[in-house]
Image (cartoon, coloured by chain):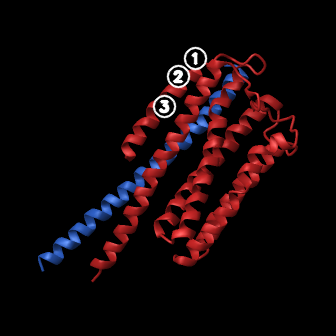
Chain colours: A red, B blue
Amino acid sequence: MSSRNSLLALVLMAAAIALVAFYAPEDANQGLSQKIFYFHVPIALTSYACFGWGAWKALRYLWLREERYDLESYVAIHLGVIFGALTLLTGSIWAKISWGVWWTWSSNQLVLFLVLFLFYSTYFMLRFSVEDGPMRANLSAVYALFGVVLIPISFLAIRLANDFIHPTVFTSAGPQMSGSMFATFCVCLAAMLSLAASFYGIELAGKRLDAKLRELRELLAP
Amino acid sequence: MTASEKYVAAAYLVVFVTVLAYVLIIGAKLGRLEREVAELTELAKQRRDG
């Protein structure tokens, strides 16, 4: 399953890069720099998806008390933080060329995304400050569930607060871009989601194997 | 190379380097797990042989 996901991610990533480079037209206002949009926004949406998936798994853990959901929630949040860091980095580069600054505190969406990112970054501090066991799993699951509230706030912030700095591309009237731009965006989003799914499968398999080996080592210990 | 081209290249490079670093870390971890499996197999063989 993991190798199939990885192959799909590889094909989609290659297609996404080719479409961004050769198919998507240059934006009339922003020029070439708008091409950052094709990776920046899908990466941000993927990080929301990872945090959401992590929260869903946390809820499943609290509901069913099965240990595997705790590990799945942890891996999803770990990936969400990686994609979140990438969102901030690519966004910062785009901000520098578009607005002339690396960061601005006057954009609600930027600040709320940073809050979301920092919230989930501290998840690891909480998780690893508690000894392995049900207490750690419970605290982590509750924390992951609290964080999910920030996702719709962060996503809708730009619309709720009339933020004029950060551009709004997806409005109630649909995507504000040409068909070829939207098609490229969709392929990029699919590529990022499949990349995250592939990483999720690989990391989870690695962690499960690690746990089994630890168990085996204990059994074989003299 | 124009300033726009440099920034776009930098943004894509950041993504590429991060993905590459992740793959390398996972690769190193798989190497460690492989070594551990070999070690435990050896230990199990020693046990079987007395």
Give the CA distance from mark 3 to mark 1.
Answer: 15 Å
Disc 1 residue type (three-letter): Tyr
> In the image, A222: left or right of A114?
left
Give the CA distance from mark 3 to mark 2.
Answer: 10 Å
Quadrant for the C terminus of chain A, please. Answer: bottom left
Can residue A195 be seen here? The reply is yes
For image coordinates 56% across by 43% down, the residue present is B18
The part of the image, by quadrant, that contains residue A34 is: top right
Question: Mark 1 sits on what residue?
Answer: A23
Mark 2 neighbour class, 10 Å CA radius: few under 14, some 14 to 19, many 20 or more: few
**Among the two numbered marks 3 and 1 on one chain, the one whose residue lies closer to the N terminus:** 3
For image coordinates 59% across by 73% down, the residue present is A138
Mark 3 touches mark 1? (CB < 8 Å): no
For image coordinates 76% across by 22% down, the residue present is A30
Pinpoint residue A8: horizontal percent, then vertical percent.
Answer: 43, 36
Disc 2 residue type (three-letter): Ala
The part of the image, by quadrant, that contains residue A171 is: top right
Looking at the rendered structure, the number of numbered marks drawn on it comes to 3
Mark 1 neighbour class, 10 Å CA radius: few under 14, some 14 to 19, many 20 or more: some
Disc 3 residue type (three-letter): Leu
Does A109 sit above or below residue A51?
above
Question: Which mark is drawn over residue A18?
Answer: 2
Give the CA distance from mark 2 to mark 1.
Answer: 7 Å
**Among the two numbered marks 2 and 1 on one chain, the one whose residue lies closer to the N terminus:** 2
> In the image, B47: left or right of A195?
left
Can residue A113 be seen here? The reply is no
Question: Which mark is drawn over residue A12?
Answer: 3
Does A127 sit above or below residue A116?
below
Pinpoint residue A58: horizontal percent, then vertical percent.
Answer: 58, 64
Could you say which is closer to the camera, residue A71 or residue A104? A71
Q: Which chain is disc 2 placed on? A: A
Question: Which mark is drawn over residue A159?
Answer: none
